[in-house]
Image (tube, rainbow, N blue to C red):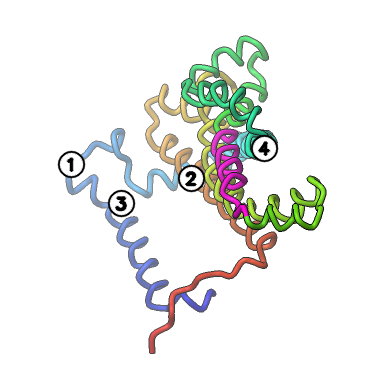
Amino acid sequence: MRPDIRRSEVIASVVTLVVVIAAWQWGPALLRVPSYIFPPFADVAGQFTALAGEQRLVLHTLVTAFSVVAGFVIGSLLGMLAGYTLGLSRMAEVVLSPYILALQIAPKVAFAPLFIMWFGYTLYPRILVAILIVFFPVAINVMVAIKNIDADFLKLAASLHSSKSDVFWKIQFPASMPELFAGLRIGATLAVIGVVVGEMVGGNLGLGYLLVFGQGQADTATVFDVIVVLTLIGILAYFGVVQLEKVVLRWKPSIRPTETA
């Protein structure tokens, strides 16, 4: 347990979770809300067990998780490539920025039917939607980081006759790491949204498909289960990036709240 997290805070968090679950279980009945509109916690948990027992939930979860990882990794790499290119080259920024901005403004859900027409009901459309969503925050964060590097560092490197390669790998690339990981944190959660959008528009596997199937069957408990699993995937993706950041940026001093007696 981290030293800046106190036992009282953990207890308060657990108590809050218990209160939420209790309200979820008995609140709908007290308010006379039909179970097909807002099912109690026991019904959602029972449906989750049933789906897991049939292995449907496991299969759909694995398909979605794979698509999220693939879309996140590819989108991040492309975003890094674009961000460093735009940050290091003014000509590239002037020429390419309008097109990248237009791509970001265009609704991503509008691309999903197009990708399905191109690639069919495969994994590719959902991964491509995730790539589009992840690309922009990573690219913009990296570009801004490169442009905000202290000019004195670059002048010092120039005075030492450092090559462009040395300047990039020893000054610009390390200096961009905090902003890069900030973009990766955002992209990790957005990747889940992109994959689900692709699965909901067209597909026969994945949690997005299961979400649409539950909606069509008026099975609210299944919809809640899918939402919970998608949330867990997003949390795992986010904290995976956080742990990687801690490993890569060990040199960066962490700021922790001062302990009071």
Q: Quadrant of the C terminus?
A: bottom left
**What is the x, y in percent for residue 238?**
56, 50
Magenta stretch contains residue 144: yes
Q: Position of residue 254 (x, y in %)?
A: 55, 69
Of the residues tagged 2 and 3, which is closer to the observer?
2
> Magenta includes 21?
no
Mark closest to the chain's N terminus, 4 or 3: 3
Instruction: Tell me if 242 is positioned left or right of 248 in this view.
Output: left
The answer to whether the residue labelled 4 contacts the one labelled 3, judged by CB atoms less than 8 Å apart, is no
Q: Secondary structure at mark 4?
A: helix
Q: Quadrant of residue 86?
A: top right
Which residue corresponds to mark 1? Answer: 32
For disc 1, the neighbor class at 10 Å (few under 14, some 14 to 19, many from 20) is: few
> 198 or 74: nearer the eye?
74
Q: Residues within 10 Å of mark 3 (few under 14, many from 20)?
A: some
Label 3 vs 1, first from the N-terminus? 3
Of marks 2 and 3, which one's residue comes earlier in the chain?
Answer: 3
The CA span between labels 4 and 3 is 33 Å
Residue at numbered disc 4: 66
Q: Taking 67 as reference, is 26 left or right?
A: left
- Which numbered circle lies on residue 25? 3
Task: Answer with mark 4 or mark 1, whichever residue precedes in sequence.
Answer: 1
Q: Secondary structure at mark 2?
A: helix
Q: Mark 3 and mark 1: span between their CA atoms?
A: 12 Å
Q: Are marks 2 and 4 in contact (CB under 8 Å)?
A: no
Q: Under tag 1, what secondary structure?
A: loop
Q: Which mark is residue 231?
A: 2
